[in-house]
Amino acid sequence: MEIPEGERETELTGLLARAYNNLGSFQEALNCLSTIEEECKEDALWFYRVGYAHYYLNQLDKAQEAFERSLELDPDDEDAKEYIENCKNGVSPYRMELYEEEEKDALNAHLEKFFGHSDHVFHEIVSPDIHVDIYIIEPTAERNYYTLVTLGMGAHWMNVPYELAEYKLERAELLIYLPADWDIQGDDEKYYWPLRWLKILARLPLEQDTWLGWGHTVPNGGPFAENTLLSGVLLINPEDVEDGAAVCQLPNGEEVNFYQVIPLYEEEMNFKIAKGAEALLGKMGGVNAVVDINRANVCAGFKLPKRRR
């Protein structure tokens, strides 16, 4: 990386792409390989690396095409043959956890009943483990704000402590309310961070073998964007909805819990750690359920007590 891009020869660029593949940065690998495509039209290794990146992005059709071209150029490559068979047989590099069709139907009906109709969905392009879509429910006269709801997180059973097993907390989806004038299609981080965080939170239980539920907080480590000091989230039961919205019962009797994401300031996060979620929510009684990036900090100046030595 210390060598300027313009000074890297074809072989070195290919090695950099291999490094990206080995690090799991598969899109970076493809971007890198695309810069030497013209020089590598007859290079089996180049096609193999392209196929490898597509395969681990779960893009099996593109992976198969690249591996087949690699095998044409190097007929003795047993690894390429194995990858081609995997692609043909739909063998994903990951074990996808997905809702059954009847489960998804029940969840869609639940969203429609309690949160509103969605005509627009942000479909996930790359889904290595669970497939997390975000349903966009437009503002209405009764609910003059956007409602964003995940669908896919609950296909994974979270690692809930044994002593809580009776409460059926293993499956969950998330939602957040955004102002009616929010640029929901905006790519700038000041508009995109709520969607990013829905996806981050949806995968956190899977990636860290843990669980998320009511009263849990997760820090960002700094402000979400340059135009706000909000820097963490709290999960609570959905607000401004009818009774029953917090839990969707699936056809087999299992339950999916819905939690609303409430952005917090650092001091509010600290207060919750020190005093608990109930105490924080008591101070936040006047805070609107809809995200306000400039709202008052209800715990301004609060600091965690120093630990005793």
Image: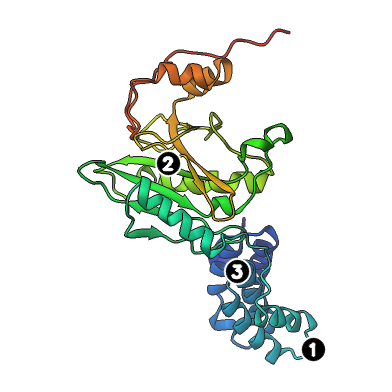
Answer yes or no: do the residues labelled 2 and 3 have beta carbons within 8 Å?
no
Q: Amino acid at mark 3?
A: Asn
Cα distance between the residues tagged 1 and 2: 58 Å
Q: Nearer the viewer, residue 5 or 119?
A: 119
Tally the marks.
3
Q: Which residue is mark 3?
A: 58
Q: Residue furthest top?
A: 308
Q: Check the image and report above or below for 272 versus 113.
A: above
Q: Is residue 270 left or right of residue 48?
A: left
> Where does residue 243 sit, x and y in percent of width and height?
40, 36
Q: Quadrant of the N terminus?
A: bottom right
Residue drawn at (51%, 17%) of the image: 271
Callout 3: SS? loop
Cα distance between the residues tagged 2 and 3: 34 Å
Q: Which residue is mark 1?
A: 76
Q: Nearer the viewer, residue 253 or 132?
A: 253
Of the residues tagged 2 and 3, which is closer to the observer?
Answer: 2
Q: Amino acid at mark 2?
A: Ala
> Where does residue 47 sit, x and y in percent of width and height?
64, 80
Callout 1: SS? loop
Q: Residues within 10 Å of mark 3 (few under 14, many from 20)?
A: many
Residue drawn at (32%, 26%) of the image: 295
Which of the two labelled residues, at mark 1 and mark 3, occupies the earlier sequence position? 3
Q: Check the image and report above or below for 118 versus 285.
A: below
Disc ID at residue 245? 2
Q: Nearer the viewer, residue 140 or 107?
A: 107
> Where does residue 79 sit, x and y in percent of width and height?
77, 79
Of the residues tagged 1 and 3, which is closer to the observer?
Answer: 3
Residue 241: in sight, yes or no?
Answer: yes
Q: Residues within 10 Å of mark 1 (few under 14, many from 20)?
A: few
